Amino acid sequence: MTLNINTLTALCVSLWFASPCFAQQSEIDPVQNITIDQWHLSLNLGLGVMSNPLKGGDDLPLVVIPEVAYYGEQFFFDNGRLGYSLSQDTPHIFNLVSEFNPETRFFVDWHPSNIFALTSANSLSTSNNELQSQQPRLDIEQLDKRKWALDAGMSYHYVFKQHVFSVQALADVSGVYEGWRSALQWQMHNNIGELVIKPSMGIWYKSAALNTYFYGVSAKESANGAIEVGSSWQPYAKIDARWPLNDANSLRFHLAYYDYSALDDSPLFEQTYSMTAFIGFDHIF
């Protein structure tokens, strides 16, 4: 059985939309059909890096990157994101989705956003602002480990020709940070001869509870007292390109930029952005 790529694109674009990773292998060509009820596996081999903007955080080298997806009639798994399609009537797609919160990727190596690596703050009180300005950047090795959080929510995709417009909202259902996040994204699927290019742009809204848990400082982590971090709007932009060599292999290029400048309340950031860059070969099994 097959599923038109316009519908499948809107389904699987969720993970690429949600975290700093590659576009999924199922996002290939707006006119190609993709088989469902079977596993889709591919392996990327090349050179790349995902930068860590936190002080004391290591950049992640990208050499071998797997992509794993399975799409049934309604349930789907796509590189760490589990979902259920409520409606597949193109051009309107509604999904229930769940995934581990990608912010943890900066604190642990074996996070799904790292494994499948190919995503203005409110003002603090005067006392917190003064305290933060006097405090040097904190090394994340000095902090308590941030726990993994499971987020769940809904996503909506509108498919118009080669364009996909997406909206999603996810909340912590694991009780770790007790906040939420939402996003808007535009993505285009374009062919220039044999070259397949997919640019996208979007913006995340992240609640103060989310930002404070991951990027704030508790009273026991700092002698200067706790530091809270306000909510934030965080834009991002990506481009993914493929040059097919044959049915199973292609050259692959991916570049993504994630803006963290709105989190200037946090003493953890050494840089105001994170970038993911990769160039190599993609093999479909």
Image: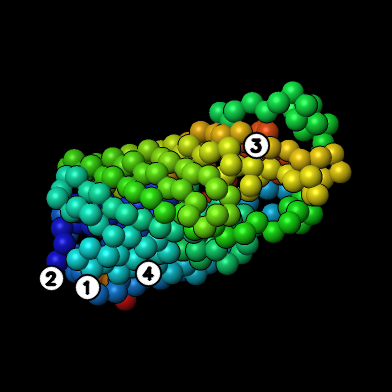
Q: Disc 3 versus disc 1: distance between alpha carbons? A: 44 Å
Q: Are marks 3 and 1 in contact (CB under 8 Å)?
A: no
The residue indicated by pointer 4 is 68
Count of picture labels: 4
Q: Secondary structure at mark 1?
A: loop
Q: Amino acid at mark 4?
A: Val
Q: Residue at x 79, y 54 (%)?
A: 142
Q: Are marks 2 and 1 in contact (CB under 8 Å)?
A: yes
Badge 3 crowding class, 10 Å Cα cut-off, few under 14, some 14 to 19, many 20 or more, is many
| Of the image marks 3 and 1, the number of the one nearer the N terminus | 1
Residue 170, x across and y down, in percent: 43, 48
The residue indicated by pointer 3 is 229
Quarter of the image where the C terminus is located? bottom left
The residue indicated by pointer 2 is 1
Badge 2 crowding class, 10 Å Cα cut-off, few under 14, some 14 to 19, many 20 or more, is few
Residue 68, x across and y down, in percent: 37, 69
Badge 1 crowding class, 10 Å Cα cut-off, few under 14, some 14 to 19, many 20 or more, is few
Quarter of the image where the N terminus is located? bottom left
Q: Secondary structure at mark 2?
A: loop
Is residue 136 found left or right of 20 in the rendered image? right
Determine which of the numbered discs, if any, sits on residue 133 in the image: none
Q: Disc 2 versus disc 1: distance between alpha carbons? A: 8 Å
Of tags 2 and 3, the one toward the viewer is 3
Is residue 212 found left or right of 281 in the rendered image? right
